[in-house]
Image: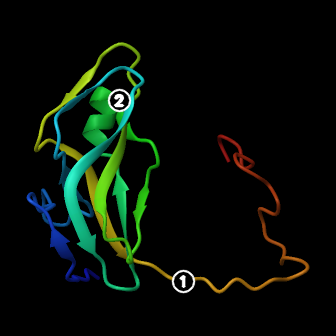
């Protein structure tokens, strides 16, 4: 099911979907800069939105920037809550160890995914029910399991 919602927006460059069926709308840079190897910078997009209650927006990396240039988002996914009204900024990181990366005004730097979100009701208990995984932590299922 594809649900369409209205998102109020203030922006010079409205995020857009590159292809029908895309989950992420492209966010563009509102500033020009060079990210040196290993450098991070919070990049302006000039985009502010008002999400309806019950929705969240996630700012995620663009796969081409990541695979071709090592450009990623430090806090991926960045979370934009429904009550936030400030500018969406993207914390970009150049993971390349030797090559700087130039960003021009208007370059696509990230994607914005808008989706419904559930609110949890946390119920304190003395003991949790068992599960197949149990208390196994990060990486506990192994490489080939």
Q: Tell me if 39 is positioned left or right of 126 in this view.
A: left
Label annotation for residue 119: 1
Please give the name of the residue rendered at 71% of the width and 49% of the height, measured from the top-left corner: 138
Few, some or many C-alpha atoms within 10 Å of disc 1 (few <14, some 14-19, many ≥20)? few
Colour scheme shown: rainbow
**Residue 127, x across and y down, in percent:** 89, 77
Few, some or many C-alpha atoms within 10 Å of disc 2 (few <14, some 14-19, many ≥20)? some
Please give the name of the residue rendered at 18% of the width and 45% of the height, measured from the top-left corner: 29
The span from disc 2 to disc 1 (Cα, nearest Å) is 34 Å
- 58, 143: nearer the viewer: 58
Please give the name of the residue rendered at 75% of the width and 48% of the height, measured from the top-left corner: 140
Q: Secondary structure at mark 1?
A: loop
Give above or below for 141 relative to 12.
above
Circles 2 and 1 in contact, beta carbons < 8 Å? no
**Residue 117, x across and y down, in percent:** 45, 79
Identify the image quadrant of the N terminus: bottom left
**Residue 101, x across and y down, in percent:** 25, 25
Label annotation for residue 70: 2
Of the numbered discs 2 and 1, the one sitting upstream in the chain is 2
Please give the name of the residue rendered at 16% of the width and 46% of the height, measured from the top-left corner: 30
Q: Secondary structure at mark 2?
A: loop
Label annotation for residue 79: none
**Residue 119, x across and y down, in percent:** 54, 83
Q: Quadrant of residue 115?
A: bottom left
Give above or below for 52 relative to 105.
below
């Amino acid at each position: 099911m594809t649900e369409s919602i209205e998102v109020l927006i203030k922006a010079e460059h409205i995020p857009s979907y590159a292809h029908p069926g895309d989950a992420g709308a492209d966010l563009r840079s509102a500033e020009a800069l060079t990210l040196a190897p290993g450098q991070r910078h919070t990049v302006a997009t000039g985009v502010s939105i008002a999400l309806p209650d019950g929705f969240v927006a996630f700012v995620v990396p663009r796969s081409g920037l990541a695979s071709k240039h090592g450009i990623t988002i430090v806090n991926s996914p960045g979370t934009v809550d429904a009550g936030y009204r400030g500018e969406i900024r993207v914390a970009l990181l150049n993971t390349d160890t030797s090559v700087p990366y130039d960003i021009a005004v208007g370059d696509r730097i990230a994607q914005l995914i808008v989706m419904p979100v559930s609110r949890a009701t946390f119920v304190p208990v003395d003991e949790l029910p068992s599960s197949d995984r149990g208390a196994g932590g990060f990486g506990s299922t192994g490489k080939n399991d």
